[in-house]
Image (cartoon, rainbow, N blue to C red):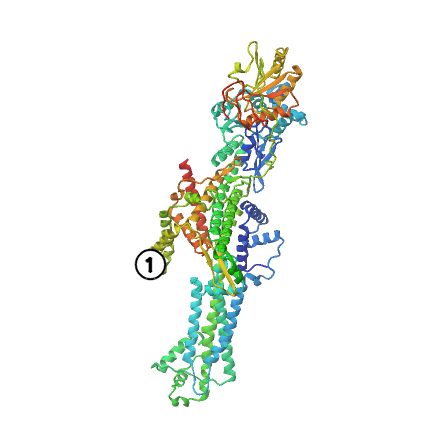
Amino acid sequence: MAKAPLTLLLDFDDQVRRDRAQPATFLHRRDRRFALACEADKQNPDAEHWLDYLARLSHSRGREVPDRDPRLKPWRRIALVFAGLGAMLGMLAMLGLLYYDGSQQINVTVILAFIFLQLLLAIFTTAQSFLGWRPWSGLVKTLQRRLGQGPADESGSTILEQLQPQLAARAAHLGGLVFGLFGLVTLLFLIVVQDLAFGWSTTLDTAPGSFHSLVAAVASPWQQLWPAAVPSPELVSESRFYRLDESAATLAPTRWGDWWPFVAMSWLVYIVFPRVLLLLLTVSHLRLRVRRLLASHPGRIALQYRMETPALETGTGPADSADQPDLSTGLAVAEVPSSRVLVRWAGATVPDEADLLDGKNSLTVNAGGANSLQEDQRVLEEVRGYLDGDRRNVLLATRSWEPPTGELSDFLEEARECWPNDSLIAIVPLHNSLAEPPPDHQLGQWLRFAERRPDLRLRICHPFRSLNASGIDGARFAVSGGPEIYS
Amino acid sequence: MTGVNRTPVFAVVGHPNKGKSSVVATLSQNDAIAIALEPGTTRSRQAYPLTVDGEVLYTLVDTPGFQRPRRVLAWLEAHSISASDRAETVAAFVQQHRDDPRFHDECELLTPLIEGAGIIYVVDGSVPYSAENEAEMTILRWTGKPNLALVNSIGSDDHSAAWVAALGQFFQVVRRFDAVRAPFDQHLSLLKAFGQLEPGWEQPLERATLHLSQQRAQRRKDAARLTAQALEDMLSRRETRTLTANQAASLSTETLAEELRQLWYQYQRQREQTLRLAVEHLYQHTRITRQEAELTWHNEHDLFSEDSRQAWGVSRSYLTTAGFGAGAVGGVSIDALTLGHSLGAGALIGGLIGAAGSFYYGDRLTLSALKLGDWHQGLQTASFGPVQDSQFGYVVLGRAVDHWWRISQRNHAGRDPLDLEPTESHWLTRLDRASRREIQRAFDLCRKKRGLDTASRQRLAHAIEAAFDAYDEWQLNSH
């Protein structure tokens, strides 16, 4: 069943409020999928379809009786109160107007004045609704609070508050219509059960001709349809009465009641019909306002954007940030051992080479990097020739910032096979110069590399070795009597 | 084969520990990718697709670094006869060594290439150039795939010129790209450069950059809306407590005021943190460590500290002029009602009232006092808030805009904690008058417990967008 426009608007507003707490990316994905589904089904992606789609996905059955929207309960109650009051007041007003104790005729002038006052009030109610003026809004709020139907939060006006002028006008016109109908029924009932004597009277110096012109003008809408309901000049002339003039009583008693068709038609045409028309107008206006509010609803504009704009997903893919490598190490940076062999690995340059090597008859060779594997093999054999007697230490200079790779592991494995088992291999990760120690994180990767290798005679060395066991975090000092660099 | 109709795939390859994962994290806006200054953090290849309505426009593949390039090259050279069989030989190498643990990393990084991926070769431009990596560059050239070299910067030194010159001999395109600091425009420019590598890739990459630009614009709007909502919530917050006669008698006014004040403070801090998280999630930052005092009462950068007020508050003259503007807008309705017969007096009077209000409330350090309601059916309501100090709104706004700016500028490769230090000057002075007025008007409505209607909320969000612009411009000019 299609939703009533107002229920649709309220449902939409509720959904937009619920969506406020949702992440924007989720909303975009959800609504874009809906738009694409509509496109595939050749459906219009309007608000009603959207709400149905969401309700379907949530297995929500929606409101089974659209006219019984609980959010509109206060307004239904207000309309009911207006209708009840209208019925009661309609009867009372007509009984009052037709009060006849036999001493005096019922004054048609008073009835006409009352009818036009009612018409004026009906027009005023409509104007108020169109202008959006709400002098009674405080009263409605109080009523809503009493009924426990107040807005959920104090911030801002709800969508229903914006429709208050139209909703109130609808209730007022309904009350006015019931008032008119009950007044008419009371009139007809009294006409049947009583003999009503109508006449007209006024303090003003008005000739019967003028009064006839007035009632003829009033009766003009129905003079073709029901000529008997238009008072004749004779009736007007003869039914004038003065409170202190007894001569008026000379009119035949049957003629006093001839005014009733005019009174009934005036009531019908100037109270009941305008209320019907204005009620229809107010209902149309309410629907128009509801449609406009829905069309200009900020949530609708945002929804439109989400439906029209493709959903972009960039952050998907494996998430492994929690799987961080273990950066701890039990090794420390050792002192550089005495050696006369230096292997420069993968282009490592040693500006202060002489400071590292042990005097005369030393060997400096290049390995890794741009060397071929055969050249590396030749280097291993050449170094083996230098490892004699008790001088079996080899320095392997590396660039501290280049991480140790599988190629270095392979080279060390081959070296271990080629060189004497008790030879010590000292990896020296170098920064820009010997005087400049590498940053902690660079030294750390070399220490962990050495720790992972099953080689007890492999060291990570530097002219500035670490003081503490962690090797990288504590204060450092210069060994070999060198100047202290930093602490 | 790189078929024209195939979705572009880019394998980000290189030496270990040169920032490959950082490049992927930034370009895929994914801060869940593991990044560490430790070789071997990436052990296997991972694909990060960019999809639009479920359609993949391109995929970035993060790979481990080369471990034994010379051995691989030696194998390739030993199995190749001519240049025409090189790509096949690379594929044969992967096929043969798939289960060999020594070549695990090489197989992982070469697999996407033999499946048709383009090459994004990453080097670190902050360390000196070395010709030692030529073996891996040669292997990549053997794959015959479209290629681009990226000079990333991990450290503070700059050797990028030497790298650019050298890499130009091996790669079709060489670009500098700092994965942690590159602004968003550079991300788009780089993606467009990826598209230039192969004719069939240009169109999907163009589409991707267009969607990314639109997404960024929308995120800005969403961030402004979130900020407006938080401001409204925080500024109109009122703590209430209903007391029975016994409770009213046993609690002193001071104790009750302190209790409600603490609840109010707690709400404000929590609401601010909710906004922080919402903005971060909007920009797909889900793992940020923030260095911003939130619940530490005595911190100098706390929401309610005098330091924050000094940093983010506005001057009294600013408040007065903004208050005049906001009041004048209200006063215009009087002129409209009299069809202009009041000759603008409504606007003037409204403006003066607004200015006076802002001047009066603008420099009060005290928060709202406790308000005790009338007794009703044996119950009394005590309330605290909303805050009457106009500066409070500007402090919240200033902190929110600053946080938004840092998040919107932050790349997903960034792993440093986000330090939200207060600034030293008032950026809001760059904001246009209409936006100032809207902000002040919204603050006044919240202060007076009137709440904002939908249109006012929208206007506030627009004004906050203008504030984002003003802050952006201020940051650009001040750094």
B418 and A184: which one is in front?
A: B418
Label 1 sits on a secondary structure element that is loop
| Residue A206 sits above or below residue B442 on the image | below
State the residue at coordinates (45%, 45%).
B305
At which x and y percent is residue B164?
49, 25
Q: Chain of mark 1?
A: B
At which x and y percent is residue B53?
57, 42
| Residue A151 sits above or below residue A225 on the image | above
Find residue A242 and report its image quarter.
Answer: bottom left
A137 and A455: which one is in front?
A: A455
At which x and y percent is residue A349?
53, 18
- Amino acid on which the number 1 mark rests in the picture: Gly
A481 and B441: which one is in front?
A: A481
* B204 with respect to B43 (left or right): left
At which x and y percent is residue A256?
44, 85
The quadrant in which the C terminus of chain B is found is: top left
Residue matched to label 1:
B340
State the residue at coordinates (52%, 35%).
B416
The quadrant in which the N terminus of chain B is found is: top right
